[in-house]
Amino acid sequence: MKIAVWDTYVKRSDGIIMHFDILVDSTLQDAEKVFRYGQAYLDTKSFETEKLTSKECIFCHVERPTEALTTEIETNGFSIIEMENCDE
């Protein structure tokens, strides 16, 4: 498996910009599904954020995942790598 990395920046209600990557199987071509995965992740946060759209989330590159990432993506459809400001 190869994974597609979607680079994502979303503004929180406090004005801080969150940065995270959404990782999916590289064969997934439906951007709206990637956005839904990202929104599902945002829904787990205790703070409000702006809506996730193509403006905030863009395809970045393809890479080979670790075995653990492969398992997570096969199980959940996606994985998230938190980069900046993803916690309170």
Image (cartoon, helix red, strand yellow):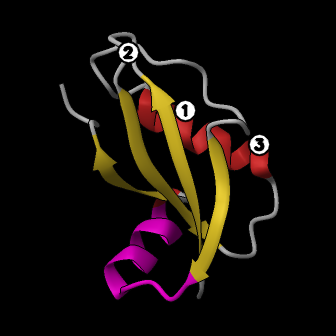
Q: Main secondary structure of the magenta part?
A: helix
- Answer with left or right where residue 62 lies relative to residue 85: right
Span shown in magenta: 63-75
Q: Nearer the viewer, residue 47 or 14?
A: 14
Residue 82 got which mark? none
User: Looking at the image, how many numbered discs can be counted on the residues?
Assistant: 3
The percent position of residue 26, horizontal first and vertical second, equals: 68, 75
Instruction: Determine whether the residue tagged by mark 1 lies in a helix, strand or loop.
Output: helix
Q: Which mark is residue 15?
A: 2
Q: Residue furthest left?
A: 88
Q: Nearer the viewer, mark 2 or mark 3?
A: 2
The kind of secondary structure element at disc 3 is helix
Residue neighbourhood size for the residue with mark 1, other residues' Cα within 10 Å, grouped as few (<14), some (14–19), many (≥20): some
N-terminal-most mark, 1 or 2? 2
**CA gap, disc 3 and disc 1:** 10 Å
Q: Earlier in the sequence, mark 3 or mark 1?
A: 3
User: What distance separates the C-alpha of mark 2 from that of mark 3?
Assistant: 25 Å
Q: Is residue 55 above or below residue 49?
A: below
Who's the residue at 40% across and 19% down the image?
A: 12
Q: Please provide percent x and percent y for residue 50.
A: 54, 18
The three-letter code of the residue at mark 1 reads Gln
Q: Amino acid at mark 3?
A: Glu
Please report the residue visible at 64 percent of the width from the left and 38 percent of the height from the top: 36
**Which residue does the numbered mark 3 point to in the structure image?**
32
Q: Quadrant of the C terminus?
A: top left
Cα separation, mark 1 vs mark 2, equals: 18 Å
Count residues near mark 3 (Cα–Cα under 10 Å), then give few for <14, some for 14-19, many for 20+.
few
Residue picked out by circle 1: 39
Q: Where is 70 relative to 33, above or below?
A: below
Report if residue 60 lies within the magenta region. no
